[in-house]
Image (tube, coloured by chain):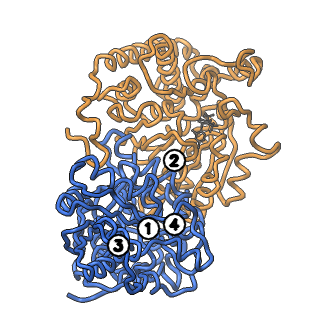
Amino acid sequence: MRTLTYWQAISEATVQCMEADESIFIAGEGVDDVKGTFGTTKEAFARFGASRVIDVPNSENATAGFAVGAAAGGLRPLLVHTRADFMFLALDPLVNLAAKWRYMYGGDKGGVPVVTRGVVGRGWGQGATHSQSPHATFAHYAGLYVAAPASPADAKGLLVQALTGDTPVVLVENRNLYPLTGEVPAEAIGIPFGVGRIARRGDDVTVVATSLMVHEAERAAGQLAERGISAEVIDVRSLRPLDERIICESVARTGRLVVADTSWARYGFTAEVAAVVAEHIPDALTAPVRRLALPDCPAPVSWPLEEAFHPGAGSIVEACLQLCGQAPVDLPALADVAAGFQGPY
Amino acid sequence: MTSGRARLLRDMVRIRVVEETLADYYRDEQQMRTPTHFSIGQEATAVGVCAATTTRDWVYTAHRSHAPYLAKGGNLKAMVAELYGKQAGCAHGRGGSIHLVDREVGFAGSAAILGEMIPVAVGTAWAFARSGEPRAAITFFGDGATEEGVFAESLNLAAVRRAPVVFVCENNLYSISSSIGARQPAGSTIRDRAEAAGVTAVQVDGNDVFAVHDAARLALRHCREGRGPYLLELATYRWREHVGPGFDHGHDHGYRPVEETEGWMARCPILRATETLREQDPDIDRTVAEWRVRFDDEIQSAVAYAKEQPFPDIEALLDGVYQPVPR
Ligand SMILES: Cc1ncc(C[n+]2csc(CCOP(=O)(O)OP(=O)(O)O)c2C)c(N)n1
C-alpha cells in the first residue's frame, strides 16, 4: 500500500468525498488561502473552487448555525477550524442544535450531518487557549460523534465515514500528527465510529489512549518491552461512540489499566474509560487505574513549563512500571512525538 | 368571501381562537407541560409574512412559535398533541412548544435559544440558492434576539453570500420584562443595524396585516430575484405574559403600564383588519363571528384528540438520537 502523510490523507478523503457527492462543501476561515488549513483543504479548493470551498467571515457562531441550516436544506457541510478553541464560539449551534436536532424534532424528520474538523495541539508556546483539546467537551453530548484519529489511515477513514454518514461529527486533529506518514488505502473507505484498534498487542498492562497519546504509548511500550513488560496499546479512535468492548476485553486479560489523554483528567476521557472498566469488570483490576492527563492548569507558554505540562511516553513508562510492581528506572529519554513540529505557528 | 385579504383576516382569527383556547386549558388543567409563548396580539406579523410564502419556502422561528407554525399551515392537531407531550405530536413529544416542526408545509423548526435559528435560516437560504431554485428561508425572532452577537454575524454572512433570507423581527418592545429602551440605545433601530450590515431593510406597522403582507411579498420577491437578504422590522405588541397563559400588565408585575397595554389592545390587528374590510364587505363582522365558531370547534376537537392520544412509549426514550424513529 502507498504511504501518505496524515494531512495528505485528510485532503485525499475530502477530495474523493466531494467528487462523489456534490452536496459536500467546505466552510472555514481561510480554507481557500495558500496554506489551505495545514494543506488539508488546498487540493479541494484547487479542484472545486470558491463555490464549494468557501471562506467565511470570522463568525464561528453564525457559520456553525449556517452549516446546520445548510444541512437541513440538504447539503453536507464540512466546517474547519484551524484552532479548536474557536469551536467554543460555535458551541450553541453544535451542542444545542446539531446534536439534538433529530431527537427534538421527533426523530424521523432527519438529522443535520454537520462535520466539524478542529485542530488541536501544542507547539511553540501556543499558550492557554491555542493549546487545548476540547474533545471530551463535545463527546459529552448525545447526538454527536467525536473522533480523534491517530494515524493517517484513520484520518482518512473516519473523515470518509463522517462525510457519508448522517450524524453530526466532530473530528479532532492534533497538529503534531500532520507530518506523520503511514499506509493509507487509495479508495475512500469509511471506518465505522465506535470501533477501537489494538495498536500493539501485550499481556501485562493495557494502555488506552487517544490521538497523539497513542504514539506516546507505542513508544512507551517499546521501552517497557526492554524491561520484560508487555504493554497492550489501544487506540479508541472515536470517543463517542466508545468501543467499550475492546477496552474491557483487554483489561480483563491484563488486569492493569493506564489511560493517557491530551486533555485534563476531571470529567474527561480518562475518567470515562476508568468508569467503563469499573462498571463492567470491577474485579478484573489487580492494581488501581492510572490516568495520565494534563496538570490542572491552562497550558503555559514558557518552554520548560510547557515541557513539564504535557505528559509523554516517559510518564506512561513510569506508570506501567509502577502498576507492574517494578521500580522506576532510567531508560533512555524518548524523542517526543511533538518534537517533530515545525514552527513557528 | 375568500378574497386574499379576507384570508389574512381569517388566518389571524384562527390563530387567536386557537391560542386563547390553549391558554385557558393550559391555565385550568395544567396538562400541557411545556413552556408556551403565546403570540396573542401579534398575529399580523406571522400571518402577513407566512401568507407571502409557498410551502417551498422554509420558516424558522424562536420560542414564540405557535402563530408562525399555524400561519405557515402547520398541522393543528399535531401541534396540540405536541403541547400535550403525545406521540402524535409534530415532534413525537420530544420537542414541545419551543421545538415545533412541520416539514410538509415548510415550517422547518423553532428553537429555545435566542438568535439560534437566525444563522440556520441563512444556511438554508444559501442551500436553496445553490440549487438555483427561487426559494427563500425566513426567520422570525424578537427584538431581544437582535442583541445576540449571532444576529450581527448572520446579517454580515447573509449579505456577503447574498443569501435569499428574510429576517423577520417581531419588535414587541420587550424582552421578558426589560423594555427595549433599557436594552438598546435611544434613537437606534433594528432596521438601521441591518442596513449598516448591507441588508435591505424596512420598518412596518406590525399590527397592520395588509402592510406586513405587502412588505413580505416585496421582501420575498427581492430574495427570489437573487438580490440578497432582506429584513422586516415589524412593530407589534404581545398581550399576555412572556411565557404562559396569563395577562401580566399592571401593578404586581410592574414592567409595563396598563395604559400602554390597553393602547396596543385597542390597536388589535384583528379589529383593524376587520375595519378595513368592512368598507367592501358590510357583512364582515358576521363572517368573523362564524369563523370564531368554526375555529372554536376545530381547536376543541384538536384538544380532545390530543388528550386521547397515547404518550410516547418509555421504551423509545433513546430512539431518534442517532437513528430515525422506527415506524
Ligand atoms: C441566549 C438566550 N438568552 C436568554 C434567553 C432567555 N429568554 C427567553 S425569551 C427571552 C426574551 C426574548 O425577547 P425577544 O427576542 O424580543 O422575543 P419575544 O419574547 O419578545 O417574542 C429571553 C431573554 C434565551 N432563551 N436565550
Shown colour of chain A:
blue
Which chain is disc 3 placed on? Answer: A
Q: In front of the other: label 1 or label 2? A: 1
**How far separated are the C-alphas under marks 2 and 3?**
59 Å
Dot label at residue B216: none
- For ligand 1, tell me if the residue under mark 2 lies within 8 Å: no
**Residue at numbered disc 3:** A327
Mark 4 vs mark 2, foreground winner is: 4
Q: What residue type is labelled 1?
A: Thr
Within 10 Å of disc 2 (Cα), the crowding (few <14, some 14-19, many 20+) is: many
Q: Are marks 1 and 4 in contact (CB under 8 Å)?
A: no
Answer with mark 4 or mark 3, whichever residue precedes in sequence: 4
Q: Locate the C terminus of chain A and report the quarter of the image it occupies.
A: bottom right
> Mark 4 belongs to which subunit?
A
Question: Which residue type does callout 4 highlight?
Answer: Gln
Question: Which residue position holds label 4?
Answer: A132
Residue B261, position as x, y percentages in the image = 71, 21
Task: Tell me the SS state at disc 3.
Answer: loop
> Residue A322: image x %, image y %?
34, 67
Q: How far apart are marks 4 and 3 (CA)?
A: 32 Å
Query: Circle 1 is placed at which residue position?
Result: A262
The yes-or-no answer for disc 1 within 8 Å of ligand 1 is: no
Taking the image as shown, residue B270 lies to the left or right of residue A194, namely right
Residue drawn at (45%, 73%) of the image: A51
Q: Give the residue drawn at x 68%, y 20%.
A: B265
N-terminal of the two: label 1 or label 3?
Answer: 1
Q: Are marks 4 and 3 in contact (CB under 8 Å)?
A: no
